[in-house]
Amino acid sequence: MGHGECVEISTFQKPKQGNFFCGDSYYYKEFPDRFICALADGLGSGECAQESSRIVMDVIKRNEHDSVTEMMKKSNQKLLGKRGAVLGVLQLDFVNKRYVYSSIGNIGLMIVTANSIKKRNIPQSGYLSGYDRPYREMADDLEDNMIFIMFSDGVTAKELATPHFLEKEVQRITDTYANFYQNSLDDDTTLIAMKYNPKS
Ligand SMILES: [Mn+2]
């Protein structure tokens, strides 16, 4: 589990049963004033899927001070001629106490507030493949102890409906998921649990 100044994070990742390469890639980093997390799922599975999702993570790292939409645009440009990928990018702004999220395709985001109210983003269909397309940002207030759970489509709607996702500690969320589901994965699966917990 990672401990930045403000965001606690725990991750679970496993390739599709029988595969060596995982087509999902993620990246996260905390700065003094904000936090970013990106998750990409390369179309299909195996090595080509991994290549695309790694290209995207490289773009995010090189452009880590960009807006969410700029990150999406630049990632898209780099995928021209490659296998496509779906992508979700989350940014937490500690100064203005706001979060921003954008995604293309099946990367999910679930937000659990301190009162256990669950919110899901509405996924935008499609995938990044180098062709220009519109992006939509979703933004709202960032509350103390808010939990953000990002996941690739290896996580099913049925699993999401279970109470494991209401755990208050990020490591409990990923551990519980791993205990129940890690031997029955039909797709590359990534689950990233993050908690905004400013220490001061
Ligand atoms: Mn997938």
Image: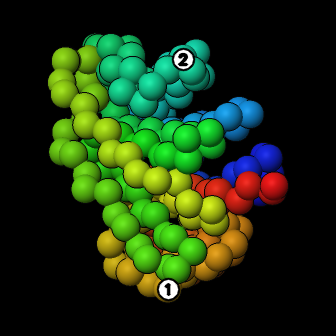
Q: Residues within 10 Å of mark 2 (few under 14, many from 20)?
A: some
Q: Real-space Cα distance between discs 1 and 2?
A: 36 Å
- Residue drawn 25% across and 52% down? 123
Q: Is 115 situated left or right of 84 in this image?
A: right
Which of 183/196 is in front? 196
Frontmost residue, 69 versus 123:
69
Three-letter code, disc 2: Asn
Question: Any mark on residue 63, and which?
Answer: 2
Provide the secondary structure element on which disc 2 rests.
Answer: loop
Q: Amino acid at mark 1?
A: Pro
Quarter residue 77 falls in: top left
Asked if one can make out residue 152 in the rendered structure from this viewpoint, the answer is no
Which quarter of the picture shows residue 1?
bottom right
Q: Which residue is mark 1?
A: 163
* Residue 181 percent location from the top left of the image: 52, 75
Does the numbered disc 2 mark a residue whose Cβ is under 8 Å from ligand 1? no
Q: Is residue 79 left or right of residue 148?
A: left
- Neighbor class of circle 1 (other Cα within 10 Å; few <14, some 14-19, many 20+) is few
Left or right for 166, reference 79: right
N-terminal of the pair, mark 1 or mark 2, is: 2
Seen in the picture, residue 111 relative to 20 is either above or below; the reply is: below
Q: Is residue 16 left or right of residue 13?
A: left
Q: State the image coordinates of residue 62 (x, y, percent, origin top left).
A: 58, 15
